[in-house]
Image (spheres, helix red, strand yellow):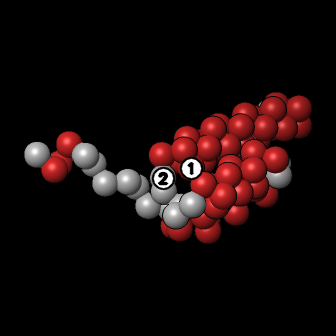
Amino acid sequence: MSIGMIIVLTGVAFFLMTCVAILDIARKDFGSIEMKALWAFITALVPFIGVLVYLFIGRKKGRLPADDASVE
C-alpha cells in the first residue's frame, strides 16, 4: 500500500468520525444550546483533534433526551 493511499484512507476515516460525532452532538442534550454549539464547532472546525477530544471527553457529557413515547 502506498503512502498516498494511507493518507487518503486516514482522511476518509477522520471524515466519517467527524460525521458520526456531529450526528451524536445533534441528538444529545448538553444542558444549553451554547454548549451544544461549542462542541459542534470544536468537532467541525479543529481538524483531527476536535473529533478525538469530543469522542473521549464530550461524548460522556451529553445526555440523550427522554423519549416522549414512553410516557403513554
Cα separation between marks 2 and 1: 5 Å
Name the residue nearer the viewer: 31 or 60. 31
Marks 1 and 2: in contact by CB < 8 Å? yes
In the picture, residue 6 is in which quadrant? top right
Give the labeled residue for mark 1. Answer: 25
Task: Give 44 or 29, whichever is nearer the viewer.
Answer: 29
Say which residue appears at 60% left-offset and 54% top-offset: 33
Q: Quadrant of the N terminus?
A: top right
Kind of residue indicated by mark 2 = Lys
Query: Against 33, is 6 above or below?
Result: above
Instruction: Kindly identify the residue that appears in the image at 76 percent across and 55 percent down.
Output: 42
- Identify the image quadrant of residue 52: bottom right
Residue at 70% from the left image edge and 63% from the top image edge: 53
Looking at the picture, tell me which residue is in the foreground, 48 or 60.
60
Q: Position of residue 70 (x, y in %)?
A: 17, 48
**Image point (75%, 50%), residue name:** 41
The amino acid on which the numbered mark 1 sits, given as a three-letter code, is Ile
Q: Position of residue 38 (x, y in %)?
A: 71, 57
* Residue 55 showing in the rendered view: no
With 40 as the anchor, is 4 left or right in this view? right
Could you say where residue 65 lies in the image, as x and y percent from the top left? 38, 54
- Residue that protrudes farthest toward the left in the picture: 72
